[in-house]
Amino acid sequence: MKIAILTSPGQWFEHYAQVLSEKLNNAPVYLDHKEIGSPFDVVFILSYHKIIDSNYLEKHKHNIVIHESDLPKGKGWAPLFWQVLEGNKEIVFTMFEAADGVDKGDVYMKKTLQLTGSELNKELRKKQAELTLQMCQEFINEYDTFKQPTPQTGSESFYPKRTAQDSKLDVNKTIKEQFNLLRIVDNNSYPAFFELDDCRYRLTIELDNNKEEGS
């Protein structure tokens, strides 16, 4: 089976795309869909942020996307982080065939990610990647089981794109009340911040693994 991986350059998943490549017999990794010249049996489209025209998709037998929600519920942007913000500890991942429209294709499989409620951004991304890689490997290894997708069913909903402004803390709320927001902020790209007396303050958060007993 001829397999390729497509992801965006400079994104959090780029490293994991190389890991997946190694697990799939060194499948080639592309950073732009226009660079894929020959047809493939399977193209895994993972954390890729460009719109792919149908004429590019038609070259390949399967164009597979994994979205971190129970489609058709939770279409759109950053579904994992929105659900963490909502306090959800069980996140359904949907593997589906890329199609015209937002997260609209037929479904190959669904898996559930279990969270403890304490993971911060980096660990959330790690767990997201691990389940994504597991699903891709399972699709290839058990191809006859998953090769025929089924249509999405149920009512659809959409998450908007998150911006840096979404990392703003409310000075009138406790840390506990805003902990899920602190879990999903990125200390570098979109750090937590608050505004007070015409000043803006930036916060970073990390797990303290050196905490002493009784401190």
Image: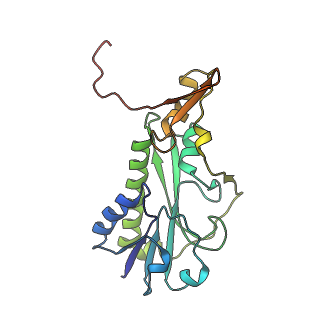
Number of disc labels: 0
Image location (x, y in percent) of residue 59:
51, 86
Image location (x, y in percent) of residue 96:
54, 68
Residue 40: name its quadrant: bottom left
Image location (x, y in percent) of residue 39:
44, 86
Q: Closest to the observer: 125 or 206?
A: 206
Q: Quadrant of the N terminus?
A: bottom left
On the picture, is 192 further left or further right than 24?
right
Q: Tell me which colouring the rendered structure shows.
A: rainbow
Q: Residue at x 50, y 71 (%)?
A: 64
Q: Residue at x 54, y 82 (%)?
A: 56
Q: Quadrant of the C terminus?
A: top left
Q: Residue at x 55, y 31 (%)?
A: 193
Seen as rendered, the residue at the extreme front is 198
Residue 43: name its quadrant: bottom left
158 lies above or below 139: above
Q: Residue at x 53, y 34 (%)?
A: 192
Seen as rendered, the residue at the extreme right is 155
199 lies above or below 48: above
Image location (x, y in percent) of residue 208:
34, 27
